[in-house]
Image (cartoon, rainbow, N blue to C red):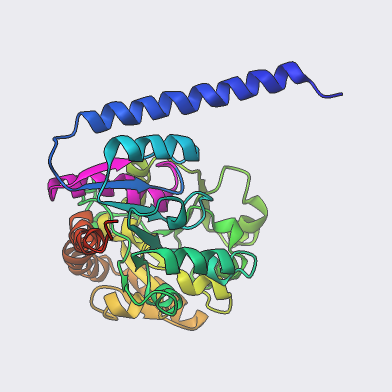
């Protein structure tokens, strides 16, 4: 039997939540200085989602520093609420972060020009490809998180350029410099259990390193007990395995910065892995963690093997590189410091915002006035 009372209560709560966040958004936008060019940002998720946090929510304050009235609209607001905000704000341009949100479609907001920010490989899913192509062709421009994503979207929108995911400038150093940290190997993924190919590779590497030395292995994005079966063969080899659950971004950065070496495996046998960029690597770089990464996707465009990171292919190369950096504190510290300097110049939010600023201004100028 349908419990109509519960349905009414649930619906009322949903409406109340939407009204609260819509009101909060209007209050925040009214506090912004008038007269500046305006951008309304539609993220696909709320700040706990890493991509939405870095490519939308944290981007807005940086755009304001560059002279924009940047308003971020909570992801759970419906189309009428979005249109009310647009009517009140009258922005010059809209920035849509990802295509996963059903309302991130430029056809819904004409004639306001829309920039699509795509940093995922959802384009490859046949169930969504037609819709995503329509979104891309309707956008004034596309920013892509990797060269692979750029290649996919440039077929449908010639105004496509690569903007790697970036993160805020490191606000504080780790309590321990890289050379003083214990031998902790981290895989700082937000959902590792969903990546079976990478999970198998990481286990193989950890077991190989365990033949040579003692170390601890930290698996992020997992609750205690959730990965016990996965840990079992590693524990049997004497590896101290720790499951680290999801946490807010600042806490995540601080925890990652305790590790000595970070792994960034990308198994391109899985087609969707081709869309990966720098999201998971950012925490390592910001925290002074030496990086060992697959010699794939955009990694070779940033890392110089043996200088600011290690690029590897085979399991044997992975095992050699991880063992070397865990056992030689001075080597990993030098590598981490060079990588940090490169990170500051290429992968921080002010850099991302500066490049997005140019894209948004060009898109705003493309608006056709009836």
**Which residue ends up furthest to the front in the rendered image?**
370
At 35% from the left and 36% from the top, the residue drawn is: 85
x and y percentages locating residue 268 in the rendered image: 53, 78
At 33% from the left and 61% from the top, the residue drawn is: 165
x and y percentages locating residue 234 in the rendered image: 59, 61
At 20% from the left and 58% from the top, the residue drawn is: 357
At 57% from the left and 21% from the top, the residue drawn is: 13
- Against 300, residue 31 (above or below) is above
x and y percentages locating residue 253 in the rendered image: 33, 48
Q: Is residue 266 one of those drawn in magenta? A: no
Looking at the picture, tell me which residue is in the foreground, 1 or 147.
Answer: 1
Q: Is residue 68 visible?
A: yes
Q: Is residue 53 one of those drawn in magenta? A: yes
The image quarter containing residue 113 is: bottom left
Q: Which residues are magenta?
A: 46-72
x and y percentages locating residue 77 in the rendered image: 47, 36
- Against 134, residue 151 (above or below) is below
């Amino acid at each position: 039997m349908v419990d109509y009372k519960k349905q009414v209560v649930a619906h009322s709560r949903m409406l109340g939540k939407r009204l609260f966040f819509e009101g909060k958004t209007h209050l925040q936008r009214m506090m912004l200085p008038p007269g500046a060019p305006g951008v309304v940002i539609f993220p696909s998720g709320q700040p706990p989602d890493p991509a939405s946090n870095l490519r939308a929510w944290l981007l807005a304050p940086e755009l304001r520093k560059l002279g924009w009235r940047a308003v971020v609209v909570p992801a759970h607001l419906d189309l009428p609420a979005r249109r009310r905000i647009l009517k009140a704000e009258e922005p010059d341009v809209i920035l849509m972060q990802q295509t996963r949100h059903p309302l991130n479609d430029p056809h819904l907001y004409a004639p306001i020009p829309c920039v699509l920010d795509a940093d995922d490989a959802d384009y490859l899913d046949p169930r969504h490809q037609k819709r995503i192509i329509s979104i891309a062709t309707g956008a004034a421009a596309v920013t892509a998180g990797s060269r692979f994503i750029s290649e996919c979207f440039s077929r449908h929108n010639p105004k496509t350029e690569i903007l790697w995911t970036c993160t805020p400038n490191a606000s504080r150093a780790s309590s321990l410099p890289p050379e003083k940290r214990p031998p902790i190997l981290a895989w700082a993924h937000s959902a590792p259990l969903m990546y079976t190919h990478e999970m198998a590779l990481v286990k193989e590497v950890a077991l190989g390193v365990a033949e040579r030395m003692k170390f601890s292995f930290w698996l992020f994005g997992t609750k205690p007990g959730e990965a016990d079966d996965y840990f079992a063969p590693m524990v049997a080899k004497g590896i101290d395995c720790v499951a680290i659950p999801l946490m807010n971004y600042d806490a995540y950065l601080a925890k990652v910065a305790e590790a000595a070496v970070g792994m960034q495996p990308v198994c391109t046998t899985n087609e969707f892995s081709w869309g990966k960029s720098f999201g998971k690597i950012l925490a390592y770089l910001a925290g002074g963690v030496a990086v060992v990464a697959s010699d794939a996707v955009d990694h070779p465009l940033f890392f110089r093997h043996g200088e600011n990171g290690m690029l590897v292919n085979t399991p044997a190369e992975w095992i050699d590189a991880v063992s070397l950096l865990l056992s030689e504190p001075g080597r990993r510290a030098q590598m981490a410091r060079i990588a940090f300097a490169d990170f500051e110049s290429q992968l921080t939010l002010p850099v991302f915002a500066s490049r997005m600023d140019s894209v948004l201004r060009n898109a705003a100028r493309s608006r056709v006035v009836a």
